Image (cartoon, helix red, strand yellow):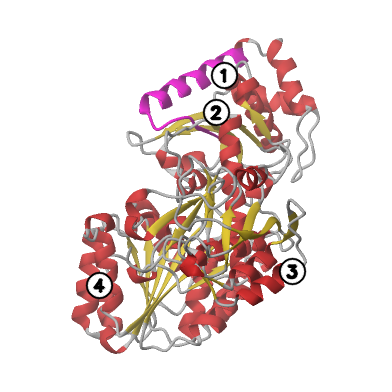
Amino acid sequence: MQYLKTYLQKITDRGNTKLAESIQKTAEDVGNRYIKTFSFSTHEIGLLFGNIQSGKTGQMFGIMCKAADLGFPAFVLLTTDNIVLQQQTLDRVKADLEGFCICGENDSRLFTDNSLIQPAIIVLKKNARILKLWANILNSTGFMKGNPLFIIDDEADAASLNTLVNRDCQSSINKYLDIIKNVASSSLYLQVTGTPQAIFLQTIASGWHPYFTYYFQPGDTYLGGDFFFPISGKPNCISFLDIIKKPTHSVVLRHLAVSAQILSSGGKVSNCLFHPSVRIATHQRFADEVKQELDWCRANADSEFRAELQSQYERLTPSKSKKQPFEVVFSKAIELLTKKSIKVLIMNGKTNIDSAEYSNGCCFIIGGNTLGRGVTFPALQTIYYTRTSKKPQADTMWQHSRMFGYDRDSGMMMVFIDEKLYKLFADINATNNSIISQIERGIDDIKLYYPSGLNPTRKNVLDNDHIEIILGGTNYYPFYPDNDSIEAISKLLEPFLETELYYQVSLRLFKEILSHIIPSPDFKLQAFQSIMDTLLAEQPTAQGILLVRRGRNVAQGTGALLSPNDWQIGGSFSDKAVLTMYQVTGAKGWRGKQLWVPNIKLPNNTMYYNVFEEEC
């Protein structure tokens, strides 16, 4: 049986030709580059990276089918520790994939009886008890002692990594995933996520840093980071809460106008999401506010409400439906209000809301953590987001981006957000684009950077002994450097006269100059070179500032290489990398010989994260 061909045909038969083409490209690329070359004698780990809510599940299924075509007889598909999500994933596997023996968490007998006659897919949630159970099942059957195992870890950054790495211990889920990997004669472990920050900051020695990374592009109708958080300017879909006098009132009016347009045009659902805080009391307060505003709409239906609804209506530019006349929209809004068919739902640890409740009609959903990873809201058109943290994390914030997706109408999206929070999201999007650029350009040592005060991920999964932060705006130079060829550096710098205060040059020249530096252990040359690669991946023509100074009689180890004047010149460039090259005389240290000594300053107010393998 041709598993991939069968799966693609099923998608095509459903009318999703473009999706089938995308999945085929991903499956064939990953299959030809990484699965075909698998030795069937090693344990390897890779990463499938896609945007939030951009269709990762279909891409995962395509890769699994390709792997089955190439000889993998057993698959473990991991979901987050959520009973409903695990069951939904199991149901989708059964609906989408043919020719496999599909097993849930309680189907050990089915797995054993199948005896790998059909390729087996075992769908498990990342729960220590469940993983321990199946580690024992896989071991006791003996099937895997002579067969490879393909593990697909959805949301791999969420629970799989070792949260006890800084205590010299191993967390339970991480431990049992290790056991499941190693119970087979060989394994290919595919991490899948839209927020890979924690994964890229794992060491190779940990066993959780990917050997390869594949990024798949979202489809044409996807609304993602660049739509909401472009490089420059504020898009029309963003409203800053800082300048709105009655925010909840504005959100309710906007969503009523959008919902009336969608529902009167044949649409089934229009959702609004409030994400104000993790506090349950705050959720109830906002639910009460929404209900009060709806009561106001009913009480003022023929006066202020009509005028305000028309003001919101005039701002709508629907792209997926014909804009209805205002009287039609107004009538639908009145119908929603008078029949009290509008749903106000609270989703948090104290409530249990099924997805069916927000799959039709006009809904206002209020919550906290439960609105994040793994939860999808159809036709989400209006978002109110004010959740803050003293120590914000990029991956957690990005997982809160429920506004991303395919079924949104770009002409009717609206995100109500604080301006400061919007800037944080824009910074996260910039780094995401940097990661994508690095992957697409084939850079192996992917670097992350964020503004000061924004952490890439939670600290308990990062090995403190192997993570360092290089601060933008800080001058770095090696205390005990050497040159592999002072003549080669002198030749490169020959065109740059000391009479000029500075030159603007390509970062590629920076890399060439630094390639001749033999650093001392205090100077992470490889990290700086990787950061240059990162900046060039984003902008191939990226420029830096070069200062060249010759015949400097500087003492070694004094703590300050640069003269006050050169320090001031370099410091005046806050948004560019600055490389100052000092040719020292060697009269005051430096092993008594002339040397070129580099001093590097990266763009200000930025923290660059570096993972290093050697012991400190």
- The rendered magenta stretch, by its main secondary structure, is classed as helix
Q: Earlier in the sequence, mark 2 or mark 1?
A: 1
Q: Earlier in the sequence, mark 4 or mark 2?
A: 4
The residue positioned 65% from the left and 33% from the top of the image is 259
At label 2, which amino acid type do we have?
Answer: Ile
Residue at the extreme front: 587
Give yes or no for contact between labels 2 and 1 (Cβ–Cβ under 8 Å).
yes
At label 1, which amino acid type do we have?
Answer: Leu
Query: Mark 4 = which residue?
Result: 179
Residue 557's label in the rendered image is: none
Query: Mark 2 = which residue?
Result: 342
Q: Distance of mark 4 from mark 3, alpha carbons?
A: 58 Å
Q: Would you identify the image quadrant in which residue 565 lies?
A: top right
Packing grade of label 4 (10 A; few <14, some 14-19, many >=20) is some
Q: Earlier in the sequence, mark 2 or mark 3?
A: 2
Q: Is 100 or 499 nearer to us in this picture?
A: 499
The residue segment tinted magenta is 271-298
Query: Mark 1 = which residue?
Result: 294
The residue positioned 68% from the left and 15% from the top of the image is 305
**Secondary-structure class at tag 4:** helix
Q: Earlier in the sequence, mark 4 or mark 3?
A: 4
Residue 494's label in the rendered image is: 3
**Secondary-structure class at tag 1:** helix
At label 4, which amino acid type do we have?
Answer: Ile
